Image: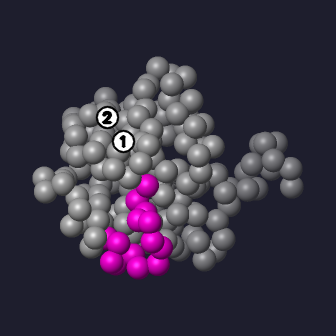
Amino acid sequence: KSLTMVWLAKWIRENVEGSRVLVITDRIELDEQIEGIFYGVGEEIHRTTSGQDLISNLNAAKPWLIGSLIHKFAGKEEGDIAGYIEDLRKHLPKDFRAKGDMFVFVDECHRTQSGDLHKAMKAILPNAMFIGFTGTPLLKADKQSSIEIFGSYIHTYKYDEAVKDGVVLD
């Protein structure tokens, strides 16, 4: 999954002029893992240190590759997502607009795709192309939500295929 993100990010950079990639994870360990994979192929990824750092980097033309925890889209108070988004918009720099043709890779999308943090992310990045990644089998209820949020599947690897290939045990 991580290598697919790397290859896709590199392809996007080489084929879409002005493109930028934001990789969203939901755990520090995944954020560090993604950073290591990108560095392993000679690509520097800026890992955001705060919500303000995320906004500042989105509002600038560089870096082309950013990594962030989805929690950086959150305010200090939980619950009132509409109020948070409104407050966020009021406090964004007046000239805020994510610079470049933004592609957002949402890792472990089955956990973060339909929650309030995803809504905040979409509000901040209304023109971005969102691509969800998951290595976890989706429940039937999650499948419909995934398709509604991200669109049709680019590729799937079914459990029975993995058993047949010998990469998992039944």
Residue 13 lies left or right of residue 39; in this view the side is: left
Q: Is residue 73 magenta?
A: yes
Residue 79 lies left or right of residue 169; in this view the side is: left
Q: Which is more toward the observer, 76 or 18?
A: 76
The mark found on residue 163 in the picture is none
The x, y position of residue 88, in whole percent, is 29, 65
Q: Is residue 128 magenta?
A: no
Q: Residue at x 29, y 61 (%)?
A: 124
Q: Quadrant of the N terminus?
A: top right
The x, y position of residue 83, in whole percent, is 33, 77
At mark 1, the secondary structure is strand
Residue 155 lies left or right of residue 29; in this view the side is: left
At mark 2, the secondary structure is loop
Q: Residue at x 31, y 70 (%)?
A: 85
Q: Which is more toward the observer, 75 or 109?
A: 75
Task: Say which amino acid is labelled 2.
Answer: Trp
The span shown in magenta is 72-85
The x, y position of residue 39, in whole percent, is 51, 25
Residue marked by disc 1: 21
Q: Residue at x 68, y 61 (%)?
A: 137
The mark found on residue 64 in the picture is 2
Tell me how many marks there are: 2
Task: Say which amino acid is labelled 1.
Answer: Val
Residues at circles 1 and 2 in contact by the CB criterion of under 8 Å: yes
Q: Quadrant of residue 8?
A: top left
First in sequence: mark 1 vs mark 2:
1
According to the image, what is the colour scheme of the structure?
one colour
The x, y position of residue 63, in whole percent, is 31, 33
The reply to whether residue 140 is in sight is: yes
